[in-house]
Amino acid sequence: MSNRLSEFQQYRTRMNDRIAQMDHLGIKRFFNLDTVAYKDGALSAKEKELLGLVASMVLRCNDCIDYHILQCMDAGWSDAELNEAFNVALIVGGSIVIPHLRHAVETVDLVHQMKAEGAG
Amino acid sequence: MSNRLSEFQQYRTRMNDRIAQMDHLGIKRFFNLDTVAYKDGALSAKEKELLGLVASMVLRCNDCIDYHILQCMDAGWSDAELNEAFNVALIVGGSIVIPHLRHAVETVDLVHQMKAEGAG
Amino acid sequence: MSNRLSEFQQYRTRMNDRIAQMDHLGIKRFFNLDTVAYKDGALSAKEKELLGLVASMVLRCNDCIDYHILQCMDAGWSDAELNEAFNVALIVGGSIVIPHLRHAVETVDLVHQMKAEGAG
Amino acid sequence: MSNRLSEFQQYRTRMNDRIAQMDHLGIKRFFNLDTVAYKDGALSAKEKELLGLVASMVLRCNDCIDYHILQCMDAGWSDAELNEAFNVALIVGGSIVIPHLRHAVETVDLVHQMKAEGAG
Amino acid sequence: MSNRLSEFQQYRTRMNDRIAQMDHLGIKRFFNLDTVAYKDGALSAKEKELLGLVASMVLRCNDCIDYHILQCMDAGWSDAELNEAFNVALIVGGSIVIPHLRHAVETVDLVHQMKAEGAG
Amino acid sequence: MSNRLSEFQQYRTRMNDRIAQMDHLGIKRFFNLDTVAYKDGALSAKEKELLGLVASMVLRCNDCIDYHILQCMDAGWSDAELNEAFNVALIVGGSIVIPHLRHAVETVDLVHQMKAEGAG
């Protein structure tokens, strides 16, 4: 089923392909470095994704929030644990984060719905 | 020995006391909520402090970085783990974070130095 | 009549209910503290809403702008007064605020239109 | 043909007219100052538009990005040169800029498409 | 007596003079527009200064906070009213505002001290 | 002669060395990518430094401003051209940029003074 989250995933894939096609060495290396930053190391990939999520929330970027929620849920963070991360982001970033908290909570619900429908 | 970190800690304590003395109910409750947000829950206090640190770095607040580094090191995060968190913050926030990375790395060194001197 | 403002109000109510249902004590207390911050005190509720509006504009959050415009107009601020607040936000925040000024001015017009239609 | 870029241009024109109609002296003078800032001077208009574009990207404002891309392409910056500016913005601003890079790259493609259709 | 606030005022005056001396028409007109934005109009100068203060706090600019606190206290806002404005800024901007709240509260105290010494 | 700019340069060098010594692959690669982003390419190194300067001003990072002013002046931008870039940053970023404009103008003066003293 199509929803804003699956549409974002398709748009993200399509435009990332388009950007790769531009073949700018610096941009390609940045994308690579961004991917590597979330791999297992002294911190686990799972821990790093949660850091990425909170950073995205306090910087108020919905697309980044959606991406990291998908990664966090794949990595095994529970809803209760995500809510705790949301709370830290809310306290650090203040009420200006609330619209992004609404977005994040809706995204978590969409992921559960997509998984229940076998499309996650 | 006095350094910028010990001076910050004294200033922070003095001004937080001054703010408490103002006795504004909303501000007092916010400070309390801020403290509670980093207590053990679905996520551990240790995990939450690292989230607070990364949030502080991408929002580029040196005082907040210093506070959370002190908390993170008390909670048991190693230098190697902190470096990984710094790297996530750097990738998310970009080169504008570099001056705060310099500050953070210096703070970690100061904490080690203060602990070696028995003042930590 | 349905428009982006009425849709926002419905979405906001629905997701705030969903967040309340998550029953996270910290998040619930933050929402409560946020509500209380705009009640009459040493400053009037009316004055505080205008502060919230300007803060929302310089931080460039359209949902927050819409919420505070609705509150400000309910509290009795005139269009001329709102324009003055918009001007302060524009000067403080610069041309990057202009897209949010366009949004804010459209929202004021939508509120008047909804009130004229008896739906405000 | 209608697309998000032509719709933005129409919305922008309509709302800027509405704002002018409000006749607030400070706001009108700010808009005028904003226009003048990008005129030929010690730096050329062409150079200034590229500065405006990079500023818009690191501040993460899609509408501002679209406006400056249109101006930059009119001023004669090539796609290769724009990509270099995108790369500087990406390095300075970090991965949080990526959603806006996707938007910017799509906008460049839309401008080319509109020009090919004789509607640019 | 010299303190960080009087030093800031001297530095601000000296550098604003230096900037005026550069004689850049756009910059001079911006400074003029900035001054005019806080004059009596549909909103009073007093009300506008409080808006400027809250905007400065959520944008986390200590120099701007100091300037607007001086203006607000000259305009007649009481400490209790300033505290209420601080609280709105804290709720909107979150714990990342706390270092600036400490700065702001210290500035209010310095202004009172300077006035008591006849130097305000 | 020692001043805040020469002290910044020494601190920057010392801490960048310390960071390199940490030997974190991701951080090292980011620093390398950051350096490469300002090399001659489709845009000249000179043009890119000016983009970096304006990005630093609207993001309000004094250390970044100082670094890019040094690079820009080395690359041959004149004071009149820098003032134009400052003006674009001021218009885009608003009065919240003014403290950083004061800092930037002082830095330009310090660079001239250091060059006159043969220390630049």
Image (spheres, coloured by chain):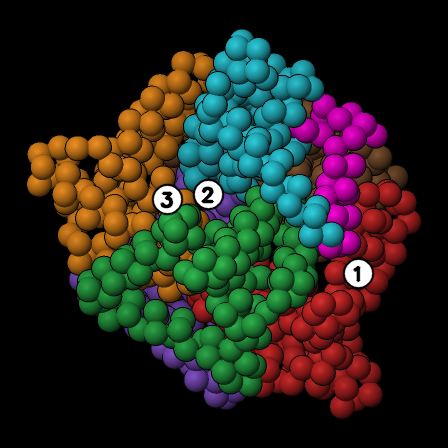
Chain colours: A orange, B purple, C green, D cyan, E red, F brown
The chain holding disc 1 is: E
Cα–Cα gap, marks 1 and 2: 35 Å
Q: Nearer the viewer, residue A42 or E31?
A: E31
- Which one is closest to the eye, mark 3 or mark 2? 3
Is residue E52 visible in the rendered image? The answer is: no
- Give SS at disc 3: helix
Calculate the distance from the C-alpha at mark 3 to the C-alpha at mark 1: 37 Å
> What residue do we see at 28% from left, 70% from top?
C28
> Of the numbered discs in the image, which one, if any, rests on residue B93?
2
Q: Position of residue B4 (x, y in %)?
A: 55, 65
The location of residue B3, given as percent across then percent down, is 55, 66
Of B96 and E71, the residue lying toward us:
E71
In the displayed structure, does residue A11 sit left or right of residue C60?
A: left
What amino acid is at disc 1? Val
Determine the chain carrying the residue at label 3. Answer: A
Q: Position of residue C117 (x, y in %)?
A: 45, 58
Q: In the figure, is residue D51 to the left or right of D40?
A: left
| Rendered view: B70 above or below B27 | above
Badge nearest the viewer, 3 or 1: 1
Q: Which residue is mark 1?
A: E36
Dot 2: element: helix
